[in-house]
Image (tube, helix red, strand yellow):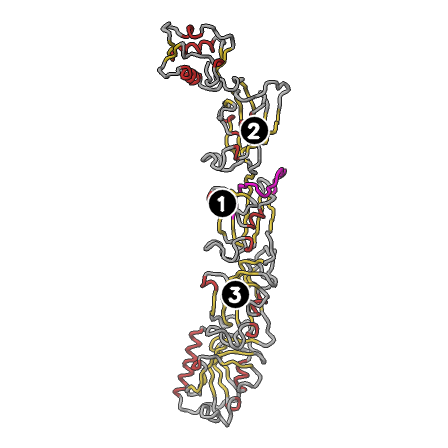
Amino acid sequence: MSHWAQGMIYLAVLVAFAACDAPPVPLDDIVIEKTFVPEQCVRAVKVGDYVRYHYNGMFPDGKKFDSSYDRSSTYNVYVGKKQLIEGMDRALVGMCVNERRLVKIPPQLAYGKEGYGDVVPPDSILHFDVLLLDVWNTDDGVQVNSYYTPEDCSRKVEVSDYVRYHYNGTLLDGTLFDSSHTRLRTYDTYVGIGWLIAGMDQGLLGMCVGERRIITMPPSLGYGSNGDGSDIPGQASLVFDVVLLDLHNPKDGVSIADQIIPQPCLRKSVAGDFIRYHYNGSLLDGTFFDSSYSRNRTYDTYVGKGYVISGMDEGLIGVCIGEKRRITIPPHLGYGEEGTGTKIPGSAVLVFDIHVIDFHNPTDKVEITTTYKPEVCDTLTKKGDFVKYHYNASLMDGFFIDSTYNYGKTYNIVLGANQVVPGMEEGLMEMCVGEKRHVVIPPHLGYGERGVDGEVPGSAVLIFNIELIEIEVGLPDGYMFIWNDEVSADLFTEMDADKDLQVVSSEFTDYILRQVNEGKGRLAPGFDAYRIIENMFSNQDRNGDGKITEDEFKLKADETSHDEL
């Protein structure tokens, strides 16, 4: 039968009583009509239990003589201890919370022949419409029902732990009196040191982060006989639906769980190193708050110098390049009681899954490892030499940058001419043709903090595997042109092709190129020959009139301020 149908039957009974002029039929015992029974009945009233219920008291004709509703207060009493009329004592036994009963009690089980003052006449049959709201026993303790427990439960709440949790607080009949969800903020507190009502202190013990449980407590472990304001009446059982989001202890340190440690690990980070790493940041319950991956850029910082939260400073010490580890940081080593606003709440434990991409120290130098050296290795590179070499370039984590092999041609530079980063200059020095090297270049000798847009990240360590293909020996330091033979005693006259006692740029250029082609002179390799000759001419043209006279003309040996003849 539906609840609506039951209600209509009950209403019809009341109307019938009110409309009937005949005297009531005598009762030998109580009559109980269950007008509403909840689907679940976790607990039924027993003798000795304490109950809270509402009622309307009526005579058989429907006339009301008493009501708890009129007093806006439940009737609270022990059952079976003669604190009630006998009929009510018996009628309450077996009731469930939220059950509703119509109880008919004969006079001998009510107020008998004496009645009750002016309220209840002698020999009155009484009808009570009863709604049970609460039941507990003095022997009751805290009841815990965990309805969800995560598979991974590495740690449980203990006395003196600090927890963050959400809850819905209801009375035993389901009436909501409080919720952290409506405030959009967790309840944060120490456990087991008296900061909470005793029942909650007990009920939270043993919980895992992510666990959900129902904590039910009698009033003796809740707010007692006084209740708490208008929301929690006195002698009320309390029910808390709790989900634990966070857990730590003030004595906690940083927790590190290594996930991937590359082998071999030739170097581990120390205080003072500069590190580049990716991370995913989450709270202990898995709530995501930040990620370097979403910005498509590593987080770059010094370690052990206070540039990051102290827990991360500690967690990044001793890592290898390529290592992945999980760093769990208690709030006193993270963002403390204040948090960071909307993303990280106060007193939150932080979990960082990091991947170390790169680290170096500002004192690092270029690391050069020869991986192959030919048996004959007599001619070594030096400053000024024009060299041709192949390379494969990558970052420390193996990320590919570039390779000359892909273009099918060598990379050509003049050593000492600042045509490559300083670290590569150093890596190519004193190398012979056919030799192969593994060169590690720290960023301050590479592309620095800025890197190369779209190719090399800022502050990145570079790895070059190089092979020297060819050397063209350079000129002595400070020279862009030298004579292979003795210099002609009549050099100016030879240059002055039209014999007008002055040398113009075209005459000068033709003459120098002819000497180079005939093997009598050499230009510095690796540079634009015409640019060199142009500079030589400018140095000789001392008055800048576009021609050189015999008075202006001098050899390099005659002065030290110009790099010309």
Please give the residue where the numbered disc 2 appears in the rendered image. 465
Q: Nearer the viewer, residue 419 or 207?
A: 419
Dot 2 alpha-carbon crowd within 10 angstroms: few under 14, some 14 to 19, many 20 or more: some
Q: Determine the CA span between mark 1 and mark 2.
A: 29 Å
Q: Determine the CA span between mark 3 and mark 1.
A: 36 Å
- Counting from the top left corner in percent of width and height, residue 304 is at 57, 45
Q: Which residues are magenta?
A: 261-280
Q: How many numbered discs?
A: 3
Please give the residue where the numbered disc 1 appears in the rendered image. 292
What is the secondary structure assignment of the residue under circle 2? strand
- Counting from the top left corner in percent of width and height, residue 243 is at 53, 61
Please give the residue where the numbered disc 3 appears in the rendered image. 241
Amino acid type, callout 3 = Asp
Can residue 522 be seen here? The reply is no
Magenta span dominant secondary structure: loop
Amino acid type, callout 2 = Asn
